[in-house]
Image (spheres, rainbow, N blue to C red):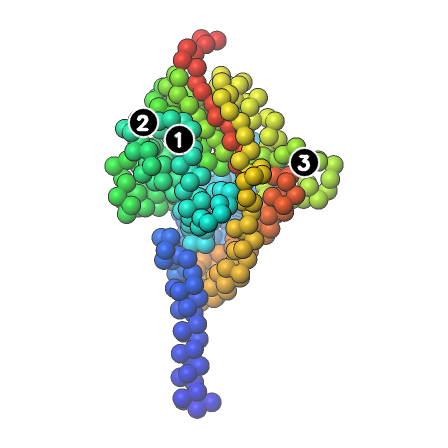
Amino acid sequence: MDSVTLYCTAALVAGGLYWFVCVLGPAERKGKRALDLSGGSISAENVKDNYNEYWSFFRKPKEIETAEKVPDFVDTFYNLVTDIYEWGWGQSFHFSPSLPGKSDKDATRIHEEMAVDLIKVKPGQKILDAGCGVGGPMRAIAAHSKAHVTGITINDYQVKRAKLHNKKAGLDSLCDVVCGNFLQMPFDDNTFDGAYSIEATCHAPKLEEVYAEIYRVMKPGTLYVSYEWVTTDKYNDDDEEHKEVIQGIERGDALPGLRHYSDIAVTAKKVGFEVVQEKDLAKPPAKPWWDRLKMGRIAYWRNHIVVVVLSAIGIAPKGTVDVHEMLFKTADYLSRGGETGIFSPMHMILCRKPEKVSSE
C-alpha cells in the first residue's frame, strides 16, 4: 500500500469516527458526549465488575424484594446507565405519548408540564420531585411554573449532573437537588406545596413506603401526581410471553417488581391520600409512546459501533458495551409491552393530602 493510499485510508477512518461520534451522535445537543461516557461514580476499572454485580441481584430474587438491598441495586444501575441515557436519549429519563406535529423533545416537555399543571402550584411555591434523575423534568417544570423545585435522587453522580445542567440552563435559583433515598427523605413534615414523581416510584420495593414518605413531607391540602409503571388489565400471568416481557422490563430497568394498575389507588388511599383522578395516559387516543424506541433502532446500532470502538481503544470503560447492549434488549421488551398493551409507563394518579389529617 503506497503512502497516498495509506493516508487516504487513515483520513477516511478518522473522518468516519468523527462523523459517528460528533455529527450523528446526539450528545452535543443534549449535554453528554460519547467521548465522555463513564460509569458515573464507579471508577472506570470497576464498571465491568459492577455490571456483573447488578445482574447477580437477579440470581437472588428475594434480595431484590428486601428494602435494604434495593438502594444499592438502583444506585448501581444509575451509575451504569446515566451517561448512556443522556447521550442517547436526553436529560428526561421517561416516556411520553407521541404528539402529531411535535418533536420527541416537545412531546416530553408537554408531558412534564402537564404534571405541574395538575398539582396547581403557584409561582414561588415549593414542590418536590421524588426521583429526579439528572433533572430534565425539574427544569421544564420550574421554567413553566416558576415554582421552586427540590429534587431527590439516590445517585450522587446524578446530583452532580443535575446541578451542572441547572446552572447551564440558568435555573439554579429555582432548582435544587439533594442526594438521598425517597423512602427516608431529609425533609421536615409538611414542607412542600405539592409533589410529583415521573416514572420513578417503580424503583421502590414497596409503593406504600414511598407514598407514605411523600405524604409526610407535603402540606395538608396539597396535591401529588405520579406517572407509574404498571401492568394493565391485558396482562395475563399465565401467559409465558407476557411474563417474559415483564421480567425483561424489570431486569433491564432495575425494578424490584412491576405492580398491577389496580394496586396504585388502593395504596395511595392506604397511606391517607384522597384520589382525585386516575387515568392511563398511554391509552388511545394517545399515540404510541413506544414509537420512539422503534424509530431509534438505527441510532442504536450507530451508537453501539461508537461504544464498541471507544471501549476497544480504552476511552470508554470496559463493560460499557455490555450496558449498552442490555439497554437495547430492554428497549425491545418495552416496545413489546406497549404493542401488546400489557404494560404502561404512564398510569397517572392525582392525589390530595386532606386538609385535616387523621391523628390515627
Give the Cα distance between marks 3 and 2: 39 Å
Tag 1 near tag 2, CB within 8 Å: no
Task: Identify the disc placed on residue 122.
Answer: 2
In the displayed structure, 141 sits above or below 311; it is above
- Return the mark for residue 241: none
Q: Earlier in the sequence, mark 1 or mark 2?
A: 1
Disc 1 vs disc 3: which is toward the camera?
1
From the top left corner, tell me how far across and down residue 98 is, in percent: 50, 45
**Residue plotted at (39% across, 32% down):** 116
Indicate which disc residue 117 carries. Answer: 1
Number of callouts: 3
Q: Residue at x 47, y 64 (%)?
A: 306
Viewer-nearest residue: 3 or 42: 3
Is disc 3 placed on a helix, strand or loop? loop
- Say what secondary structure mark 1 lies in: helix
The amino acid marked with disc number 2 is Lys
What percent of the width, then of the height, locates residue 234?
A: 67, 36
| Image spot of residue 208 (x, y percent) | 52, 24
Q: Amino acid at mark 3?
A: Lys
Q: Residues within 10 Å of mark 2 (few under 14, many from 20)?
A: some
Please give the residue where the numbered disc 3 appears in the rendered image: 234
Q: Earlier in the sequence, mark 1 or mark 3?
A: 1
> Is any part of residue 112 visible from this angle?
yes
9 with respect to 249 (left or right): left
Depth order, front residue of 67/273: 273
Q: How far separated are the C-alphas under marks 1 and 2?
A: 10 Å
In the rendered structure, the answer to whether residue 172 lies left or right of residue 235 reads: left
Q: Quadrant of residue 15?
A: bottom left
